[in-house]
């Protein structure tokens, strides 16, 4: 009998159990913190992983110890064949959780099929509840569609529903209390995320709202009760007495969570990233298309994990200039 593959453990003992898979670099929105204002040059379709290649890699990662897969984009719902892919991923033996991150604007009509495919957790990227502001941030008038998809997610009983809100000074930081109030009625985890610099997103330091500032605003109005932080969890989460949901803070710029990191990222063009902040990568697509066996690809994955640095890709601090020259967020997959 063959021995089970060794788990994906890096040089400082972090075990990796969570893979984020970007299935496309395309999106129907044009969010200012993600897409450069001058537009984007999308990768040729031949450069993007096929559904069969994604499934093969997902199965291999699960065999190496991944228990959670998250499908991201771009916007995953624009990928042709996405429901079929979700069904295949949801059926992988040994997988414990299949999640998806979406802007929600294309989800409402397909959400029952998404649930039937095995997705149990959905993260909505939503930065405002105000129609004119939503249009200004995303370039599209889709707020009603997003809110309808959120309502459908609650009504059909998804195990986890989260809202990811990127807080930007003088853009949407005055809505922090509105998002917290939303958790009174709805069993949603709202996570406030610090604005990060990525290629072409016109980040400036004066737009960054440190999580401590957002935390102070909330504490002036609500009682926040700290919740236990699970292994690998990036958010610092709090319950609010009397609320059905929770609030949390993801602070990659001012208070990194690297010591608990258990995740890897696979980009839509097949690049394996062992850290969001690291440029170095392994091209798994090329390996597959050059005829590599699963064993050979597994060795490449282990090699990438072994090279993972203790924090922030080996940087003592985040360098906004370095990050701004990196891949745009829609190419990284969040």
Image: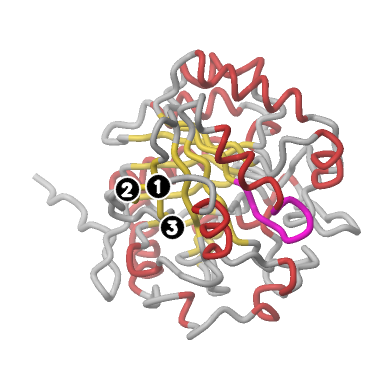
Question: Counting residues from the N terminus, which is met first, the one under dot 2 or under dot 1?
Answer: 2
**Mark 2–mark 1 CB contact (< 8 Å):** yes
Q: Where is residue 70 in the image (x, y as percent from the top left)?
A: 47, 41
Q: Name the residue under label 2.
A: 227
Q: Where is residue 51 in the image (x, y as percent from the top left)?
A: 56, 36
Q: Which mark is residue 264?
A: 3
Residue 72's quadrant in the figure? top right
Q: Residue at x 38, y 61 (%)?
A: 301
* Front residue (pair 177, 256): 177
Q: What element carries label 3?
A: strand
* Discs 1/3, front: 1
Residue 39's quadrant in the figure? bottom right
Q: What stretch is highlighted in magenta?
A: 165-173
Q: Which residue is drawn at 77% across and 63% down?
A: 201
Q: Position of residue 249 (x, y in %)?
A: 49, 55
59 versus 282 height, above or below: above
Residue 167's quadrant in the figure? bottom right
- Assess disc 2: are there few (<14), some (14-19) or many (≥20) residues with their C-alpha within 10 Å of its C-alpha: few
Quarter of the image with the N terminus is top left
Question: Counting residues from the N terminus, which is met first, the one under dot 2 or under dot 3?
Answer: 2
Q: What element carries label 1?
A: strand
333 versus 118 height, above or below: below
Asked if residue 24 lies left or right of residue 317, the reply is: right
Asked if residue 226 lies left or right of residue 203, the reply is: left
Alpha carbon separation for disc pair 1 and 3: 26 Å
Q: Name the residue under label 1.
A: 238
Spot the residue most to the left. 1
Q: What element carries label 2?
A: loop
């Amino acid at each position: 009998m063959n021995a089970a593959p060794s788990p994906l453990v890096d040089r400082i003992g972090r075990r990796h159990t969570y893979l984020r898979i970007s299935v496309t670099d395309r999106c129907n929105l044009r969010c200012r913190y993600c897409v450069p204002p001058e537009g984007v040059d999308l990768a040729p379709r031949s450069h993007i992983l096929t559904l069969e290649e994604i499934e093969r890699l997902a199965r291999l990662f699960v065999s190496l110890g991944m228990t959670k897969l998250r499908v991201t984009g771009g916007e995953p719902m624009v990928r042709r064949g996405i429901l079929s892919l979700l069904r295949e991923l949801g059926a992988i033996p040994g997988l414990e959780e299949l999640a998806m991150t979406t802007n929600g604007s294309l989800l409402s009509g397909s959400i029952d099929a998404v649930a039937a495919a095995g997705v149990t957790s959905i993260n909505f990227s939503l930065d405002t509840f105000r129609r004119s502001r939503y249009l200004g941030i995303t370039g599209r008038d889709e707020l009603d569609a997003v809110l309808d998809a959120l309502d459908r997610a609650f009504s059909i009983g998804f195990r986890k529903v989260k809202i990811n809100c990127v807080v930007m000074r003088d853009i949407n930081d005055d809505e922090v209390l509105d998002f917290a109030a939303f958790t009174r009625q709805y069993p949603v985890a709202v996570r406030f995320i610090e604005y990060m610099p990525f290629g072409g997103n016109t980040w400036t330091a004066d737009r960054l709202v440190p999580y401590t500032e957002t935390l102070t605003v909330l504490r002036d109005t609500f009682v926040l009760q700290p919740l236990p932080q699970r292994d690998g969890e990036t958010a610092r989460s709090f319950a609010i007495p009397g609320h059905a949901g929770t609030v949390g803070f993801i602070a990659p710029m001012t208070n990194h969570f690297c010591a608990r990191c258990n995740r890897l990222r696979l980009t839509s063009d097949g690049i394996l990233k062992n850290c969001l902040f690291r440029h170095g990568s392994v091209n798994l697509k090329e390996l597959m298309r050059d005829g590599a066996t699963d064993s050979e690809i597994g060795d490449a994955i282990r090699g990438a994990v072994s090279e993972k640095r203790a924090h922030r890709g080996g940087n003592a601090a985040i360098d906004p200039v370095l990050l701004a020259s990196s891949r745009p967020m829609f190419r990284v997959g969040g």
